[in-house]
Amino acid sequence: MPTHDDLRLIEHLHGSFPLADRPFAEAAAALGWSEDELIERLRRLLAHGDLTRFGPLFQIERAGGRLLLAAMAVPEARFDAVAAQVNALPEVAHNYRRQSAHPEAPDATPLNMWFVVAVEQVEQAGAVLARIETETGLPVWAFPKEREFFVELRLPLLPQTSPQEASPQTPSQDQPSISAAPLDDLDRRIIRATQAGLPLARQPYEAIGAALGVSGQQVIERLRAMLARGLIRRIGAVPNHYRLGFTANGMSVWDVADERADELGRRIGALPGVSHCYRRPRHTPMWRYNLFAMLHGRSRAEVEQQAERIAAILGEACQAQDILYSTAILKKTGLRIA
C-alpha cells in the first residue's frame, strides 16, 4: 500500500511538473527530499502499479486527432476473446468492463465493453471501429463527444475526505479555446518519446533530446508550447485510482432534455468528484442517455451519494438515469502514436 509520503508525492506531482534542466530536483526540494529519493519513489510507485505512468497527458484533438468513446454488447462466453481482439489494436487507449447498477432491470443496457479510440487523424477513428466490427462480428456503438464540460481526474488523497467535499471545479468551457493545428515532425517525435512516460533520470528532457538528436532545451520549449495550446493537458503523475482506494468508479448517464443539456452539463462538470463530463449522442431506442459524468468513490455508497446530488440539480429535466460501474480494467495505456 502507498505510504503517507507516497500520497504526498502523487498529489504534489499531479500537474505543473517543472520544465527545467533538473525538474526532479525542483520537485523534490518542495517536498524536502533529495532528487534521487524522489526518482526512486516514483520508480517504485510505477513498478507496483500505484501509478500507471508519469509524464504528459496529451489531448490529441488539439492536433486534429480524435478521442472516440465506443461500446459493445459482448456475449459472456466470448468476452475474454473479444477483449483480446480489441486490446490488440494500438489505437485503443482504454478499455473497461462496465455493468449497470441495476443489471436485472428490464431496461438495463446490454453494453458491457466500453473503450476509447485515440487517433491522430479524425477519419482513422471510423476505420478502427469498422475493423473491430469486422474482426468480432459484433456491432460497435460510437459515442463521440458533442460537448466537453470537464475533464480531470484529481482524487482527494490527503486528507481523507470524500470527493464531494472538495472545492468546485473549473468547467472546460470556461477555459480558453485554442484551435487545432497539425503536428510537425519534431512534435510528433516528442510525443512518441513521451507518450508512455518521462525518463526517470536527473535530466529527463536531455535524455529525450539525445534520443531525438535535439537539445534538451528544444524539448522543453516544445513541451511548453504544447501545454500553451492545450495539446498537453498536464505533465505529472497518473494514479491508478483502484490501487489508491477509489475502488468504486461509475459512469453515470442521464437522459436530460436536449434544450437544457448544455446548461446543466456545465453545472454537473463543476461538481467535486466528477472527473469527466460530456454531452454525447443518444442511440434510441437502445440507448436513451445524452449526459455522461464519471464518478469516483471509496465505495459504491459514496458514488451513489454523488449521483443523488446530480439528480437533485437535474430535477425534472432528467427522465432516466443509470450508473455503469467499472468492474475490470481491460486496457489502460493512453495515446499511442505509431
Image: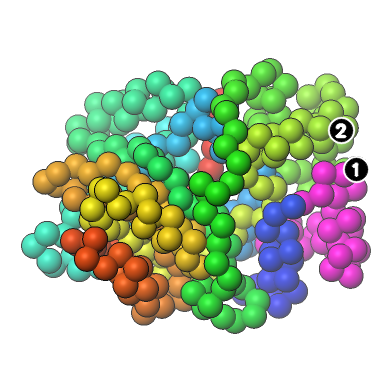
Is the N terminus in the top left, top right, bottom left or bottom right quadrant?
A: bottom right
Near mark 2 (Cα within 10 A), the count class, few <14, some 14-19 or many ≥20, is many
Badge 2 element: helix
- Report, in whole angstroms, how far the alpha carbon at label 2 lies from the one at label 1: 8 Å
Q: What stretch is highlighted in magenta?
A: 17-46
Q: Looking at numbered disc 1 in the image, what kind of residue is underneath it?
A: Asp
User: Where does the image place residue 192, in percent across and percent down from the top left?
Assistant: 65, 30
Which residue in the protein does label 1 denote? Answer: 21
Image colouring = rainbow
User: Where does the image place residue 202, in percent across and percent down from the top left?
Assistant: 88, 48
Badge 1 element: loop
Q: Which residue lies furthest to the left in this view?
A: 106
Which residue in the protein does label 2 denote? Answer: 216
Q: In which quarter of the image is residue 68?
A: top left
Q: Looking at numbered disc 2 in the image, what kind of residue is underneath it?
A: Gly
Q: Is residue 258 left or right of residue 203?
A: left
**Residue 215 in view of the camera:** yes
- Along the viewing direction, whichever of 149 and 299 lies nearer the viewer: 149
User: Where does the image place residue 320, in percent across and percent down from the top left?
Assistant: 19, 62
Asked if disc 2 and disc 1 are in contact, CB closer than 8 Å, the reply is yes
Q: In this view, does 159 lie to the left or right of 329?
A: right
Taking the spot 19% from the left edge, 32% from the top edge, the residue there is: 137
- Along the viewing direction, whichever of 337 and 164 lies nearer the viewer: 164
Depicted 14 relative to depicted 85: above or below: below
